[in-house]
Amino acid sequence: MSLKIKSIAIKNFRSFKDTVVDLDDYTAFVGPNGAGKSTVLCALNIFFRQTEEAPTNLIELDVEDFHNGDVKGPIEITLTFNDLEPEAQADFAEYYRSGLLIVSAVAEFNPTSRRATVRQFAKRSAMKEFSDFFRRFNDGAPAGELAGIYEEIQKSHPEFGLPKKGTKEANRQALRSYEEDHPESCVLIDSEDQFYGFSKGGDRLSRYVQWVYVPAVKDATKENVEGRNTALGKLLSRTVRSKVDFESEIAALRDATLGSYKKIIQQQQTALDDLSKTLTAKLGEWAHPQAVARLEWTEDPVKSVQIADPMARLFASEGNFSGDLARFGHGLQRSYLLALLQELANTADTAQPRLILGCEEPELYQHPPQARHLASVFKKLGQGNSQILVSTHSPHFVSGRHFEHVRLVRRDEAEKKSNIRWTTCEKVAQKLSDISGDKIAPIEAERAQLHQALQPHINEMFFTQKLVLVEGLEDTAYITAWMTYSNLWDDYRKSGCNIVAVNGKSSLIEPLIIAKELSIPTFVVFDADGNVQDAGRRNLHKLDNEKILKLLEGDISSPFPDSPVWTNTYAMWPENLGSILKQEVGAALWDSSYSAATKGLGNPSGSFVKNTIHIGDHLTILRGKGVKIPTLDRLCAAILALA
């Protein structure tokens, strides 16, 4: 496999002031509209010079591309690559250091043209004392000049203990070895080069990575003919062309045709010979008697005979109709593009450059089952010779069990900049160890336990501006029903808040840690379960209560409080929410209205203490009787006050 992106640093570009974000094999950028998710993919388009369908000029940037219009400093988009194969390490030997290759796209504002031209630089971790040697080495300086520079370094810095001068390659290796052994003495030095997206010149990264960008409004009708710069062309080159070899047969055809072409022009040489004699005679009259003019047919081996590889074109069918892709709806068009990705996922060709795919809102025009399937295709691609980056508003493309792949993009309105938050299994495992006192298990074991604890449905927490974590659906039912009855539902929706039920108190801990790591404002509603008398179960509740209170900076000395505990980040009930409400309403009225709600449902058998429909009907009956429930009023107010 080829190199992949370890991280991207974005500086002074649009909503980002100075941000670095790590990338995984599969990375999902989530966040509200306007937060900056698409800006990350746009930054990659600038780096890879992906100008197809770009709404703005990505080669020469505008004032509006600078963060808050600050043109005093440059825009910098820096990619750090790792996992370089030996061939790539040798190819980028002058830049490859400590297992990394660091390349930047830099744009400095020109006040005269009012533009900022994007140039590419590689970051060399090097010692300033050696910079002249490496600069002249890359310029192709002769061995003698380089030997002189090397000797000057030896004289100026005998403390380096450099070996005696040798060949220019030996001298270069000696200096590089010293740099690698003394990283503390090195600084990052820019060196301009052509790395990706140039029609002429180096385009050096294209041998190892291939960037394909699918925007949210991709016009698939332009993709049904294979072209070099279209997403289809790039993807087909990795699928169809990995299985079909036109090159050898077309080369043979080109050679045969060129041979026939030469015979034709040789047969027509007589006409030029006659004209040559005439011109020679004229030259003898006008210039010199011995002047000779000779005309010959010549051929350009490249341009004279050009035979291009055939191009693949899509003709789609649906029912009895068959025709061009432009005749079909957006759903089929986008499904067609994404079907290519599924085929690509089944193409295990690691000899090709690594595919780096950026896809905006892959859920567009997809039904939920299709979206879930596409998400699994992306993950499969990420496990092979691909790196997948998506920006999404859909929970289908993130998972609570794979929280480490989520990058939460938020805009700080006070500082007028975007931030990106994420966490890792290692960090969550460490936090679990801190609050429990247990020793951290091997990370794979920790990951397995975390994935088991983090159920898929909690992925909604990544899409909310404010989070309310509750134990079960009955808590959600009490809160949402009372919000509705109190005419607070619209305020709740406008607040950007979302209630996530985690299915049990013990399952609160991991989501709460992740929410805090991602800086999501969170309010927790949980039961102390102080009414549990069984010693073993009571001890488990005590341990869970203490862990949650530690995370919320609560009073861990009272894991079983006698009355509700209220703070601006949590509400803790001595037993459970239902028991508190029953006390406030009064047991007789509570039980009678409970029975009435059960009767309204047809008197089915079983307990309805945690039934969401029954809870809603129960509260409706109580409201109809004019009952006030201060705890629910206070709980709703606390949630709406969440900052």
Image (tube, helix red, strand yellow):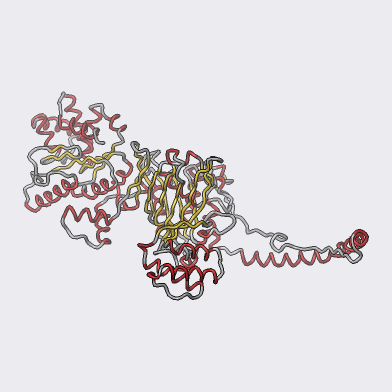
Residue 116, relative to residue 343: is it above or below? above
Could one spot residue 384 in this view of the protein? Answer: no
The quarter of the picture where residue 140 lies is bottom right
Q: Residue at x 18, y 49 (%)?
A: 506
Give the side of residue 354 with respect to residue 562, left or right: right
> Which residue is farthest front?
155
- In this view, 93 is above or below 633: below
* For residue 467, above or below residue 24: above
**Left or right of residue 475, residue 157 in this image:** right
Q: How many numbered marks does the figure carry?
A: 0
Could you tell me if residue 202 is visible in this image?
A: yes
What's the residue at 18%, 30% (across, down)? 633
Residue 540 locus on image (x, y percent): 12, 52
**Quadrant that contains the C terminus:** top left
Side of 205 where 29 appears, left or right: left
Q: Position of residue 286 (x, y in %)?
A: 91, 58
State whether residue 643 is above or below residue 324.
above
Image quadrant in which the N terminus is located:
bottom left
The x, y position of residue 316, in whole percent, is 55, 48
Q: Where is residue 95 in the image (x, y as percent from the top left)?
A: 46, 62
209 and 70: which is toward the camera:
70
Which quadrant of the structure image shows residue 572? top left
Q: Residue at x 62, y 67 (%)?
A: 248
Decide which of 44, 320 is in the foreground and name it: 44
Of 219 and 421, which appears nearest the observer? Answer: 421
